[in-house]
Image (tube, rainbow, N blue to C red):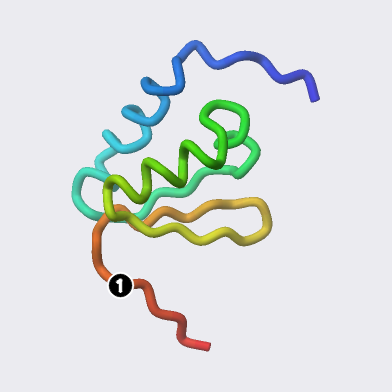
């Protein structure tokens, strides 16, 4: 992987993610796990989710973030 460095700091990347329109209105955003690992780190990302009271799930290398404090239920 060539891995170019992000022009954003870890804090700026998190602020940018959660400043999106979908996040700001309590919607859903999606990011590749490898990007979260590269720019923030999974542990710090999980800490930020907890701090905000948000939930996330992962499937096939994609992390889906629910930018609200509502419960997440599975239909299966």
Residue at image mark 1: 71
The residue sitting at 34% across, 28% down in the picture is 16
Q: Position of residue 57 (x, y in %)?
A: 50, 61
Q: Residue at x 37, y 35 (%)?
A: 17
Q: Is residue 9 left or right of residue 3?
A: left
> Up-down: is 19 above or below 57?
above
- Farthest residue toward the left? 25
* Residue beneath the point at 37% across and 41% down: 48
Residue 19 place in picture, x, y as percent: 27, 34
Nearer to me, 37 or 27: 37
Task: Tell me where residue 34 appears, x and y as whole percent.
Answer: 65, 38
Is residue 64 positioned above or below 23 on the image? Answer: below
The part of the image, by quadrant, that contains residue 36 is top right
Furthest residue toward bottom? 76
Where the N terminus falls, by quadrant?
Answer: top right
* Vertical position of residue 38 compared to residue 23: above or below: above
| Mark 1 element type | loop
Residue 60 at x, y percent in the picture: 68, 58
Q: Is residue 66 above or below residue 22?
A: below
């Amino acid at each position: 992987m060539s891995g170019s460095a992000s022009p954003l700091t870890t804090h700026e990347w998190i602020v940018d993610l959660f400043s999106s329109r979908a996040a700001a209105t309590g919607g859903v955003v999606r990011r590749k796990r490898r990007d979260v690992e590269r720019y923030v780190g999974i542990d710090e990302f999980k800490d930020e989710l907890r701090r905000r009271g948000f939930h996330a799930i992962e499937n096939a290398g994609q992390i889906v973030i629910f930018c609200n404090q509502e419960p997440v239920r599975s239909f299966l």
